[in-house]
Image: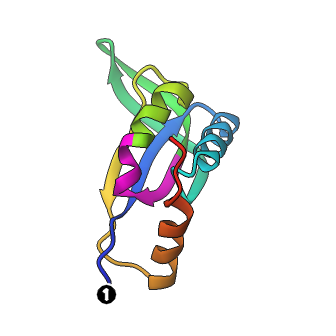
Amino acid sequence: MPHTDAIVVLTTVTSADEALTLVRGLLERRLIACGTVLPGARSLYRWQGKIADEQETFVLLKTRAARLEGLRLAFSELHPYKVPELLALPVSAGLEKYLEWIDGETSLALA
């Protein structure tokens, strides 16, 4: 397997519309190769001393570690949450053509 710096970034937003806006903005900046929008998530978490129970949309972003700082900056502008989830998981292996595609789609990042 070839070495890769591909990562999968996890985030959540309130609605599918917010997810689509976020993913399109990141695609336009070439910070991600793909965003998968999964509506229907339910998140339970502690926030400001209380337990919250919210319906959310889960988003998987496929990109490279080299674009992580650009994603952080873009999240501060594009993500609707005050404290957005941004968790980057390393990809240890994958289909070589897919990994090359991720590299190609994110190689000319604008942010």
Quick check: is 24 in the magenta stretch?
Answer: no
Q: Which residues are magenta?
A: 59-69
Place residue 69 in its image quadrant.
top left
How are the residues colored?
rainbow
In the image, 11 versus 102, the foreground residue is: 102
Q: Position of residue 75 (x, y in %)?
A: 47, 33
Displayed quadrant of residue 4: bottom left
Observer-nearest of 46 and 101 = 101
In this rendering, would 82 be left or right of 48? Answer: right
Mark 1 residue element: loop
**Residue farthest to the bottom?**
1
Q: Residue at x 57, y 44 (%)?
A: 26
Q: Position of residue 74 (x, y in %)?
A: 49, 34
Amino acid on which the number 1 mark rests in the picture: Met
Q: Which residue is mark 1?
A: 1
- Look at the picture and state if 9 lies above or below 42: below
Report the residue at 44% width, 19% height from top.
82
